[in-house]
Amino acid sequence: MTAREVLLVVHTGRTDTRHAAEKVAGWFADAGIALRVLEREAPDLGQSCYQRVVPFGSQAAEGTELVFVLGGDGTLLRAAELARPAGVPVLAVNMGRVGFLAEADANVLDEAVAQVIDGHYEVVDRMTVDVRATLGNRQLARTWALNEASVEKSSRERILDVRIEVDDRPVSSFGCDGVLCATPTGSTAYAFSAGGPVVWPDVQALLVVPSNAHAMFARPLVVSPDSRIAVEVDPSGHPAVLCCDGRRTFVLPPGARVEVAGGEIPARLVKLRQGPFTDRLVEKFELPVQGWRSPRP
Ligand SMILES: NC(=O)c1ccc[n+]([C@@H]2O[C@H](COP(=O)([O-])OP(=O)(O)OC[C@H]3O[C@@H](n4cnc5c(N)ncnc54)[C@H](O)[C@@H]3O)[C@@H](O)[C@H]2O)c1
Ligand SMILES: Nc1ncnc2c1ncn2[C@@H]1O[C@H](COP(=O)(O)OP(=O)(O)OP(=O)(O)O)[C@@H](O)[C@H]1O
C-alpha cells in the first residue's frame, strides 16, 4: 500500500494559521499521513509540521491525495495552481477574511481533518477557463483561471478601449476600466463587483462582464460554456494587463488579443458540507433574508 501524503498550503503571514498548521500536522501524523509543505513556507512552520519540502510548481502536489489549505480565497487560488496539474482536489479551511471558496471554518478544523483521514468527502469539478493572449502571430501568454481572466487598463489615468467578440463575431466596442471573463465560480468575485450575475457553481456558462464601461450598452453577458470569447485591445490605444485569478499577470500591448474558452482541465474542490450553494451565498454575503423593513402592522 502506498503511503498517504497531503500537501499543506498555509497563509503563513498569520500567527493563528501557523498554530493551526501545527495542530493539523499532529493529527495527520497520528493517522500515518505524511505532510509536504512548500519551500517558501517551511521556514515559518515548525519542523514538526512536515516530512518533506517541495518547490512551488506543477510537481508540488504530484502523488498527494489532496492539497489542504489554511487561509482565505487567495491562498486557495494559489493552492489551485499546484493541485490542478496533479489532478488532486483542494480543501480549504477558512482562516481569511471571506473564504467564500472554503469548505469549513476554523472552529471545525478538527472535524475537517477527521473527514480527510476517514476519506469521508466528495470531490466536485469546477469549471475553469483556458486563456491565450497574442499580438499578431506572437503568443504573449497561455494560461488558465478558476475565477476569471481580467483584461484591465494598466494606467489609472487612462481609459481602456476594447472590442468584444463571441464565437468570432463582434459584439461591442467601448471604453472601460476592464473586462472580466469569468467562470461560475468567479461570478461571486471580481465579476460580482462589476455588476455581473451570481451563477450557481453547477451551471455550465461563461460570463463577460465589463467594468466601468463608458457606453450605452455594456451589460454583462452569459454565454455558452462552449463559446469562445475574445477581448481585443485597441491597436491605437493604451496598453493593458491580463490577470488570471489575481495571480498570473501579463502585459498586453495595444493591439493584443485575449481569447478565453472553457478550460480543458477542471479545478477539483473537496466538498465536506451537504448544504446548498444558496446557503453559502446568504451566509458569506450576509444577505438580508428577512429584509430590513419591519413587518406591516
Ligand atoms: N473589485 C474587486 O472585487 C476585485 C478586484 C481585484 C481582484 N478581485 C478578486 O480577487 C481574486 C483574487 O483573490 P485574492 O484573495 O488573492 O485577492 P484579494 O486579497 O485582493 O481579495 C479579493 C477578494 O475577493 C474574494 N474572492 C476571491 N475569490 C472569490 C470567489 N470565487 N467568490 C467570492 N469571493 C471571492 C476574496 O475573499 C477577497 O475578499 C481575483 O480572482 C478576483 O476575482 C476582486
Ligand atoms: N505564504 C504565502 N506566500 C505567498 N503568498 C501568500 C502566502 N500566504 C498568503 N499569501 C497571499 O496573500 C494574499 C491574501 O491571502 P488570503 O486571500 O488567503 O487572505 P485573506 O485576504 O484574508 O482572505 P480572503 O481572500 O478569503 O478574504 C493572497 O494573495 C495569498 O495568496
Image (cartoon, rainbow, N blue to C red):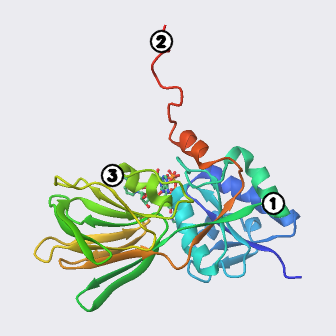
Mark 1, secondary structure of its residue = loop
Q: Residues within 10 Å of mark 2 (few under 14, many from 20)?
A: few
Q: Residues within 10 Å of mark 3 (few under 14, many from 20)?
A: some
Where residue 229 sits: x, y (%)? 34, 72
Mark 3, secondary structure of its residue = loop
Q: CA distance from mark 3 to mark 1?
A: 37 Å
Among numbered discs 2 and 1, the one appearing first in the sequence: 1
Q: Is residue 185 above or below residue 84?
A: above
Q: Amino acid at mark 3?
A: Ala
Where residue 94 sits: x, y (%)? 62, 51
Among numbered discs 3 and 1, the one appearing first in the sequence: 1
Q: Which residue is mark 2?
A: 296
Q: Is residue 39 visible?
A: no
Query: Which of the 4 image quadrants contains residue 129?
Result: bottom left
The residue positioned 33% from the left and 76% from the top of the image is 167
Q: Amino acid at mark 1?
A: His
User: Disc 3 beta carbon < 8 A from ligand 1?
Assistant: yes
Among numbered discs 2 and 3, the one appearing first in the sequence: 3
Disc marking residue 194: 3
Along the line of sight, which residue is nearer the eye, 87 or 77?
87
Given the current orientation, which residue lies at the most extreme left position?
A: 236
Q: Amino acid at mark 2?
A: Arg
Where residue 252 sits: x, y (%)? 26, 76
Query: Which of the 4 image quadrants contains residue 119?
Result: bottom right
Contact? badges 2 and 1 (CB < 8 Å): no
Q: CA distance from mark 2 to mark 3?
A: 34 Å
Along the line of sight, which residue is nearer the eye, 205 or 156?
205
Mark 2, secondary structure of its residue = loop
Where residue 35 sits: x, y (%)? 75, 71
Disc marking residue 120: 1
User: Quick check: 99 left or right of 30?
Assistant: left
Along the line of sight, which residue is nearer the eye, 9 or 293?
293
